[in-house]
Amino acid sequence: MAKHDASAPTPTVSDAIVGALRAEGVDTVFGIPGYQSYHLFDAFHRAGNALRVVHSRHEQGAAYMAFGYAKSTGRLGVVSVVPGPGVLNASAALLTAQSTSTPVLCLAGEIPQTAIGLNLNFLHEMRDQTATLRTIVKWAARAESADAAATLMPEALAQATSGRPGVASLDLPMDVQGAPATMAEYRRLPAPALDIDTDAINSAAIIIAQARRPMIMVGGGAIGGREQINELARMLGAPVMSFRSGKGIVSDRDPLGYNIVAGYRLWPEVDVVIAIGTRLEIPHLHWSKTADKTIIRIDIDPKEIDRYASPQVAIVGDAKTALDALLPAVAKKIGKPSSAALAHLADIKNGAAKSIQEIQPQVAYLQAIRDALPDDGFFVDEVTQVGYVSWYAFPGYQPRRFITSGFQGNLGHGYGTALGVKVANPKSPVVLISGDGGFMFNVQELATAVRERLNVVAVIFNNNLFGNVARDQNLLFGGRTICTDLKNPDFPAMAESFGAHGWRAQTPDELRRGLEKAFTLDGPVLIEVPLQECANPWPLLYPNRYAGFLEEAATAVMGRSKKP
């Protein structure tokens, strides 16, 4: 490795990369330095206060922090790791970010460019790192020279943030990182323009005007059209169903804000579905009967429009632009919704709420958290009995406040993700809920939270089990369970050994009061909640979970779409 003169540094490729990040408004990088990223981290250091560098105790934790940062803000999250094992350690989080359409840039170290492909067994060498990453992320490339880095960095940033956001990964060989570079002014690549199909808009408006019982379904891709969605819902008197990433686009306080339980109950009556920024996998995979519905889809990604089945009307474009065109076309064709129709929707919602109250004790604990957490606070879910219930029982009042790993369901993602959320939103309370199994996947990041003085409150529901696996094994295999029992530490004592605050809450009321106290403290807090028997969350979430339904649904959609 070439020596670096710290007193009079010559601008390098790494400096140019930092310049590009700063030009894009990036203020934070997460990661762990190593042999193949020394030049890059030195450039981070020399950026001074313009760039905060948060180093974790594991590459997976760093990548989840970048994910949480981006998921909670919509801004680019950046992570940097060493090649080989570092990249593979980070890959679970990169997969999560890609699956949830979250803008993340991975700056991955690499062995010297001159040695790539020779299989000389360099430290951290991987056979074809870039090719491996291409199977996980939206876009991946390797900068083979300083000139290539100058071209690829703008492309990486554009890929991560434009169109349907996702993960871009740029491999940076260690000799390229330190190569001299001309510090030309960074120029952002223009986002590709998408013209909204006016014929599709008019067709959608006609269908909507004729609808008897329309339903709007929203996902994370609809957040940019929040105001327009609320206007459309009021115009039609149509409920807006959200699941995870779409929570808060229409507040759950709004009579038209529907969760998945209310949506399922209304589903048999629905004749027109307006799907905005959502994969629409819930009705297609879990509710099954979509053939009698007229479906209108608005999505920025044309590959997603007919992933499961072709809609009657497809509008390719971002939610805001498409809805700005659709709203006046609809307004010309409809009258006001009737009071009887609105009353019926309220009855459905109230009935669903009563059913949800029966899922105990999970709902009582979630209500305690909701009572303590301000509207602008962040709730990070995990793969746990309480987490599953939160998908339908935790009210959302603003978008981007319910942070989830989406369909990946990554056990253990939560704590690293929550730390990234807090870094991006230092003035807002952040609560993570986790099971005892999942929390131990990234428990080492307590050290990061203490060092960075991040007041993230982790609520650990402890039943000494991989609880859902045990439930499934009991139900599916006649009570035979294997590899589900867990031996745990004293969680509060463990937290205190790291320098965090820790205590237990035995009841929902104790948890509520504990959270109120925790939000006033400096630094991280862990609250353990001993949890015994829990109501089965699945009958309200996926009513046919144990009836072979998923296999039937998969068979039903096989052959409809073979697209990647």
Image: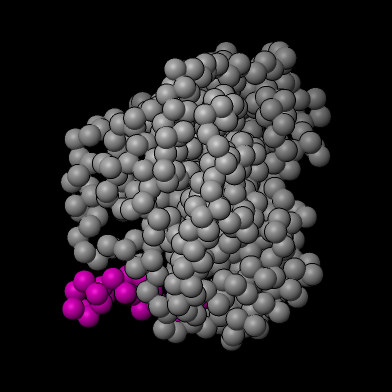
Residue 73 lies within the magenta run: no
Residue 369 at x, y percent in the picture? 63, 70
Quadrant containing the N terminus is top right
Give the mark count.
Answer: 0
Residue at 55% x, 37% y is 335
Q: Nearer the viewer, residue 72 or 369?
A: 369
Stretch in magenta? 461-485
Eyeballing the image, is 467 above or below 102? below
Residue at 20% x, 53% y is 551
Is residue 155 found left or right of 184 in the rendered image?
A: left
Residue at 55% x, 64% y is 394
Eyeballing the image, is 265 above or below 147? below
Eyeballing the image, is 509 above or below 558? below
Q: Nearer the viewer, residue 240 or 477?
A: 240
Picture quadrant where residue 33 is located: top right
The colour scheme applied to this rendered structure is one colour
Can residue 303 be seen?
A: yes
Quadrant containing the C terminus is top left
Is residue 518 found left or right of 442 in the rendered image?
A: right
Residue 124 at x, y percent in the picture? 44, 41
Can residue 304 be seen?
A: no
Q: Nearer the viewer, residue 559 or 489?
A: 559
